């Protein structure tokens, strides 16, 4: 009798597992069950369908050559049987069978298995608040959601997005592009919490608000108002008018089947698996958004639902369910998005996460054009590197700007995976030509600055710390602008003293040696040079603002 493999869930992880398992064991009988009507679709593409960047929802569930990945496709091309609009209501581990129930008719049946893969995914979090079931309140998860959201965006005027994470911010652009007045509500102190540190998030927020989007942080929703459909969102900051509300406050793993079957649930609340994606039952595997994984940097269990991870895990599960020996080492939490003209992303640990995990860290903010500054089309990006102070090992990178952030994130993800140090990163032989990068790529420059800080040669101070000092009346220091008079006149930080770098050596006597001096320029290079000049002249308490003017997230002096 051929090996009988049953897979619960037919999207990213389940579809990948089925396809790989069939390639590994062509004679195996593979059946995939899914409760939805649509299978194997790219949910991450929904915002782009709403904005018309993707014209037809079928493109979200098609192969690169345009063939729709439906049940017929899987049967004829993959040799896999797919049963849609059917729930799996029970896993009987003792008899190795699952109970099926057809949605609509309620007809029940059983299906035996030798090996089982749980790929039940996740569900959007819907807060138990008054009015949360009103028409016009929607999540962004399924093809049905995509079609409905696009229809509602075409007929509405005011949208409120609850949650400023990846899905929420990607939806911002989609709705604003359709002409809607968009307000984003986030209960944390910043947008993209857990993905960016606050100063990097502030750079992205400035870009979003410049496009007319209202961002309300530290704002809590208490309910929704309306009659036949939603009309407003009630918050602790007032009532926000809205005829469309998008809930984007996170996702929960669908674990009910596994839990009811007695499988171990991990500390994250998702299904516990080993590095082979085996559950606590050796005949059952789990992959995708329903299971937990490992953070490669810390070694700790985390829950990180993402389509790319689901596909990689599906492949591993598909190999192992057929008797293979593949492993999944974990993730770095790499993430990226585009909102209007701004790109933002990260890999590894943020400074906040690294400190919470017990690391002693050093950081650097480094802004620069994404290619040779003289080449047409050069655009700014800002990088933030986080490294372990003692070893110099890179722990994380964040990138924000209108330029190309993706390749810097990908290089850093590779480096972190192999435990590279900032010294090693500074010597990586990256591709160089003016259309693609500067001779010293942004990542290498940032690594060099970080090396200088780790060695004690450079002393940077974060924009947040400078702002705190400015607000503390007992903190007496000099904020030194070493740019040109024209730059100072155009934009400056309140209270700054102008001494251009070229004149600094001649004006040392105008600066007191008994005061702290914080220098700044456009990107921090001249600020660093000013620090070295002052140190050489006997000034001992000197630093520069990390990232200079380009990463200053606060208002400038008018």
Image (cartoon, grey):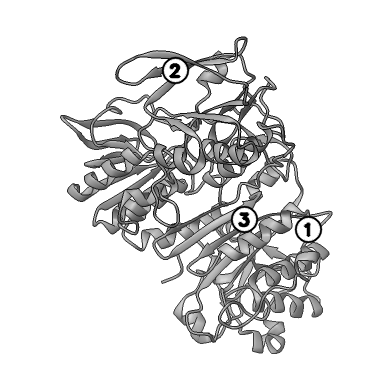
Give the image location of residue 555, x and y in percent: 45, 64
Badge number at residue 265: none
Badge number at residue 474: 3
Quadrant for the C terminus, please. Answer: bottom left
The residue nearer to you, when weighing 466 against 268, is 268
Badge number at residue 420: 1
The residue nearer to you, when weighing 410 against 96, is 96
Give the image location of residue 548, x and y in percent: 59, 70
Q: Is residue 529 above or below residue 472?
A: below
Front tag of 2 and 1: 2
Q: Is residue 524 above or below residue 417?
A: below
Q: Which residue is drawn at the image coordinates 48% and 84% (left, top)?
A: 376
Give the image location of residue 333, x and y in percent: 61, 46
The residue nearer to you, when weighing 341 against 211, is 341
**Element carrying mark 3:** loop
- Within 10 Å of the Cα at label 2, are there few (<14), some (14-19), or many (20+) other Cα atoms? many
Q: CA distance from mark 3 to mark 2?
A: 70 Å
- Within 10 Å of the Cα at label 1, are there few (<14), some (14-19), or many (20+) other Cα atoms? some
- Within 10 Å of the Cα at label 3, are there few (<14), some (14-19), or many (20+) other Cα atoms? few
Q: Which residue is drawn at the image coordinates 19% and 33% (left, top)?
A: 229
């Amino acid at each position: 009798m051929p090996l009988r493999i049953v897979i619960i869930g037919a999207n990213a992880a389940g579809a990948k597992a089925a396809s790989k398992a069939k390639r590994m064991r062509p004679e195996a009988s593979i059946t995939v069950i899914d409760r939805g009507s649509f299978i194997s679709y790219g949910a991450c593409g929904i915002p782009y369908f709403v904005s018309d960047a993707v014209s037809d929802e079928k493109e979200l569930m098609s192969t690169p050559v345009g063939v729709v990945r439906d049940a017929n496709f899987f049967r004829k091309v993959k040799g896999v049987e797919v049963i849609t609009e059917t729930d799996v209501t029970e896993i009987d581990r003792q008899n190795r069978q699952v109970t099926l129930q057809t949605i609509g008719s309620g007809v029940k049946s059983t299906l035996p298995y030798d090996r089982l893969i749980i790929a039940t995914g996740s569900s959007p979090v819907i807060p138990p608040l008054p009015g949360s079931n009103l028409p016009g309140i929607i999540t962004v998860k399924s093809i049905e959601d995509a079609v409905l959201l696009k229809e509602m965006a075409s007929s509405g005027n005011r949208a409120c997005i609850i949650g400023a994470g990846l899905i929420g911010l990607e939806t911002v652009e989609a709705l604003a592009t359709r002409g809607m007045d968009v307000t984003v509500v986030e209960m944390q102190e910043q947008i993209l919490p857990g993905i960016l540190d606050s100063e990097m998030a502030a750079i992205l927020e400035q870009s979003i608000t410049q496009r007319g989007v209202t961002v309300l942080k530290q704002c809590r929703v208490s309910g929704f108002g309306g009659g036949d459909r939603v009309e407003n969102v009630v918050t602790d900051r007032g009532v926000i008018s809205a005829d469309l509300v998008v809930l984007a406050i996170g996702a929960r793993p669908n674990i009910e089947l596994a839990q009811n079957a007695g499988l171990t649930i991990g500390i994250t609340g998702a299904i516990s698996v080993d590095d082979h994606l085996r559950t606590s039952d050796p005949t059952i595997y789990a992959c995708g958004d329903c299971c937990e994984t490992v953070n490669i940097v810390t070694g700790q269990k985390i829950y990180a639902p993402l389509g790319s991870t689901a596909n990689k895990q599906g492949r591993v599960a598909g190999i192992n369910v057929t008797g293979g020996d593949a492993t999944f080492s974990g993730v770095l939490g790499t993430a990226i998005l585009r909102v209007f003209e701004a790109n933002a992303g990260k890999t590894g640990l943020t400074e906040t996460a690294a400190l919470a995990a017990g690391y002693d860290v050093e950081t650097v903010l480094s802004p620069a054009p994404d290619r040779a500054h003289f080449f047409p089309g050069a655009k700014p990006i800002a990088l933030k590197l986080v490294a372990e102070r003692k070893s110099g090992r890179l722990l994380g990178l964040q990138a924000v700007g209108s330029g190309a952030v993706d390749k810097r994130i990908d290089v850093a993800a590779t480096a972190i995976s192999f435990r590279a140090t900032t010294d090693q990163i500074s010597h990586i032989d990256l591709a160089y030509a003016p259309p693609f990068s500067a001779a010293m790529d942004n990542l290498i420059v940032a690594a060099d600055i970080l090396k200088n800080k780790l060695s004690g040669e450079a002393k940077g101070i974060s924009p947040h710390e400078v702002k705190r000092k400015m607000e503390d009346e007992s903190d007496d220091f000099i904020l030194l602008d070493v740019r040109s008079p024209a730059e100072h006149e155009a934009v400056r930080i309140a209270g700054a003293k102008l001494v251009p770098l070229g004149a600094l050596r001649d004006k040392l006597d105008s600066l007191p040696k008994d005061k702290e001096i914080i220098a700044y320029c456009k990107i921090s290079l001249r600020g660093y040079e000013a620090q070295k000049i002052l140190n050489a002249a006997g000034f001992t308490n000197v630093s520069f603002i990390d990232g200079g003017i380009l990463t200053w997230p606060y208002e400038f002096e008018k």
